[in-house]
Amino acid sequence: MASHAGLAFVIIISAYFLDIIDASIVQIALPSIQKSFTVSTADLQWVYGAYAITLAGFLLLMGRAGDVFGQKKIFLIGLSVFTAASFAGGLSPNLLTLVVFRALQGIGGAMTTVTAFAIFLGLYPEGPERNKKFGVFVAVLSGGFVAGAFAGGVLTTFFGWRYVMFVNVPIGIVAILLSQKYLPNAAGWVQNKHLDVPGAVTVTAGIVLFVYALTNAATIGFAALLTYVPLLISFVLLGAFVFIESRSKAPLMPLSFIRRGSVLASNTLALVLTSIVGGISFILTIYLQVILGYSAIAAAFGTLPPALIFFLVGGWGASRVLNRFGARKTLLLSSAFVTIGVLLLIPISAQGNYFGIVPGMVVWALGASIGFPAVNIAAVAGTKHGEEGLASGVVSTSFRIGFPLGLAVLLTVAGVFDPPAAAGAGALATAAAVVTGFQYALFAGVLLGALAFVIALRIKDPPPMQWGKPEANQAT
């Protein structure tokens, strides 16, 4: 199987690319979908929201299912579900049907991405080679957003929004055929093939409700009934999950795994870093289009500098930094850059211009681009054979929850500190009020960056003897 490791890596990359490109490609098509079904903007958001919620909710369960039943098996089922749901979604006669198939796409996406990362952990043992390959992951993810936006625009303009869904079908079929032949065929490691059902139900339902509540919080606030009720229920369910896991003979997520090494600190850091990126990215997009009056295309070009940094630095430079300085120092450097970058963005104003935000954007993106690979590597360091899916599921969930969490928290801060414009004060006063709220949100982002730095201090580098031992992690 070693001779096919390169091709297996390409297949894994393709699975991630399919997930990332799908997110951005559908967002571009949303106005056309709204016009086709004649629905409100509030209802339209669930075309994306349904996918994001089920994807985040099922990551931990599907990662562990791969450990039990075999990563390749779950990966292939996930690809099949994703491909079939894409085709059916393209045929949807109404919005509700489309949202249902988007939710199924999310489940398929959770199965493929989490097991793809687990297979990756089996292909490459801890050390410089894994770090280098993971940098390629980051480059592909960055390129996927850009490619998705471009492809979505072309397909929607010339063929209609349904082809945004149909385009996944041939890609999925080819990936299924290649995966069947070239992915390593490792069996599940648990002898009794048993999944912790109570744990699976509580953690999946808890995460789904948590992300659902955060999605609502970003639009209607934390005080709304549809936000705090599911939020409270999610806390109860997640608390029940921890209770169940502490007493289960075959836990879905052994609590000893979370306490090992830097697993807890790394996943907490992943949550904080992605919260900053999710919230700041949205604020910058709104600032460029609503405050500065940029068109959607002009705003897209405006985000090219950070996109290129993620592609180049995250894809190739980050692994060099990580191999030279280790995870802890890399993450301290990353957190410092992110904090300084957000701090440089605070002076934004309604009378400002694009060049005023470029320094902050560049420094912030530089920090995040070296931080994401490093925190992933730190989160899976010391993973034992049979825990690949567990480690992948935990860190993937941390990343997926971070984006809606940051968006909800920073937009809430912006709303609280957004002084209402006086009646008849005009558009300029209104824009100034919005920017004032954004400035307070950016200050909250600085505080989150400082928190990330403190957490990074707790990260421990793996002992040198763990690096480069294929027998410790490689799948059979």
Image (cartoon, helix red, strand yellow):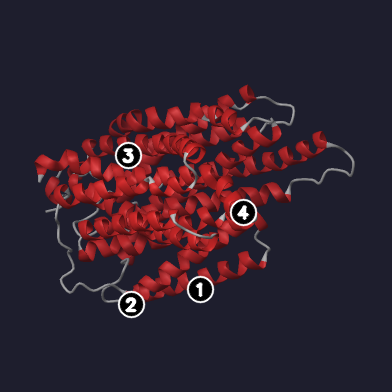
Disc number placed over residue 62 in the picture, else none: none
Residue with the most extreme right position: 424
Q: Are marks 2 and 1 in contact (CB under 8 Å)?
A: no
Residue at image location 42% in from the left, 32% down from the top: 310
Q: Looking at the image, tell me whether mark 2 or mark 4 is earlier in sequence order.
A: 4
Identify residue for label 3: 137
**Residue positioned 68% across, 63% down in the render:** 223
Query: For the residues marked 2 and 1, what is the alpha-carbon distance in whole angstroms?
Result: 17 Å
Identify which amino acid the numbered label 2 is placed on.
Arg
- Out of 302 and 367, give the one closest to the viewer: 302
Give residue 347's quadrant in the image: top right
Residue hosting label 1: 236
For disc 2, the marked residue is: 247
Locate residue 97, reporting x and y percent.
Answer: 49, 63
Please give left or right for residue 111 compared with residue 207 in the image.
left
Mark 4 lies on residue: 218
- When the figure is inspected, residue 209 is found, relative to residue 453, above or below; the finding is below
User: Where's the C terminus, which quadrant?
Assistant: bottom left
Q: Secondary structure at mark 3?
A: helix
Mark 4 / mark 1, whichever is N-terminal? 4
**Is 377 displayed left or right of 429 in the figure?**
left
Foreground disc of the pair 2, 1: 1
Image depth: mark 1 or mark 3 in front: 3
- Contact between labelled residues 3 and 1, with CB atoms less than 8 Å apart: no
Q: CA distance from mark 1 to mark 3?
A: 35 Å
Amino acid type assigned to the residue bearing label 1 in the image: Val
Question: Which sits earlier in the primary sequence, circle 3 or circle 4?
Answer: 3
Callouts 3 and 2 close, C-beta under 8 Å: no
Q: In the image, 258: left or right of 429?
A: left
Q: Position of residue 215 (x, y in %)?
A: 57, 57
How far separated are the C-alphas under marks 3 and 4?
Answer: 29 Å
